């Protein structure tokens, strides 16, 4: 192979309300709010393959990760994805936290829903820890992982 992956650049999440989603990452998860950028329509449509795409982006920075929050203002036929974690194409972002219960409580107060229950991890390298899935109104799924 004459090439290699050099690292992770960011994780992108399409959202309905850029300010609401950025506030969650900043106020609840403690991320730092970065730049907000209006992407050029020619670039947006060209890179995404979505004709007429008009996108505003806000970056939020957490420990070891940058999340790109994208709010499409066009095209008009956008929809909310309602995929379940078991559905092909579903994706989630997993974050290490030091107190899964506290983060779940704060997230629920901020409008997120606990998808199931907080579960003890019983197998694998994180056995002895805890995990929980959260979902927001946009269909975004976060997994919270507390190490043993």
Image: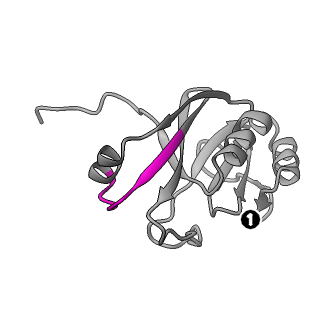
Residue to which mark 1 is pinned: 115
The one nearer the camera, 55 or 80, is 55
Horizontal and vertical percent position of residue 51: 32, 62
Quarter of the image with the C terminus is top right
Name the residue located 81 percent from the left edge and 49 percent from the top edge.
Answer: 107
- Residue 49 is situated, as x and y percent measured from the top left of the image, at 29, 58
In this view of the protein, which residue sits in the foreground, 4 or 10?
10
- Is residue 87 among what the camera can see? yes
Q: Tell whether position 49 is magenta.
A: yes
As drawn, 36 above or below 78: above
Q: At which x and y percent is residue 112? A: 78, 56
Residue drawn at x 51%, y 56% is 73
Residue 146 visible? The answer is no
Seen from the viewer's position, the closer of residues 56 and 64 is 56
Please identify the quadrant where the N terminus is shown.
top left
Residue at the left extreme, as displayed: 2
**Residue visible at 74% across and 43% down in the picture:** 24
Magenta region includes residue 131: no
In depth, the one of 60 and 16 nearer the eye is 16
First to last magenta residue range: 48-57
Depicted 7 relative to depicted 28: above or below = above
Quarter location, residue 79: bottom right
69 with respect to 138 (left or right): left
**Mark 1 crowd level (few <14, some 14–19, many ≥20, 10 Å Cα):** some
Q: Is residue 3 left or right of residue 58?
A: left
């Amino acid at each position: 192979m004459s090439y290699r992956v050099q690292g992770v650049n960011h994780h992108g999440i399409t959202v309905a309300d850029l300010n609401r989603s950025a506030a969650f990452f900043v106020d609840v998860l403690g991320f730092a709010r970065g730049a907000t950028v209006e992407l050029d329509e020619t670039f947006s449509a060209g890179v995404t393959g979505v004709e007429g795409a008009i996108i505003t982006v806000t970056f939020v920075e957490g420990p070891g990760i940058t999340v790109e929050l994208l709010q499409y203002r066009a095209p008009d036929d956008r929809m909310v994805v309602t995929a379940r974690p078991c559905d092909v194409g579903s994706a989630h972002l997993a974050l290490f936290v030091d107190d899964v219960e506290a983060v779940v409580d704060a997230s629920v107060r901020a409008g997120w829903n606990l998808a199931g229950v907080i579960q003890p991890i019983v197998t694998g390298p994180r056995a002895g820890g805890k995990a929980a899935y959260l979902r927001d109104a946009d269909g975004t799924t976060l997994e919270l992982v507390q190490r043993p």
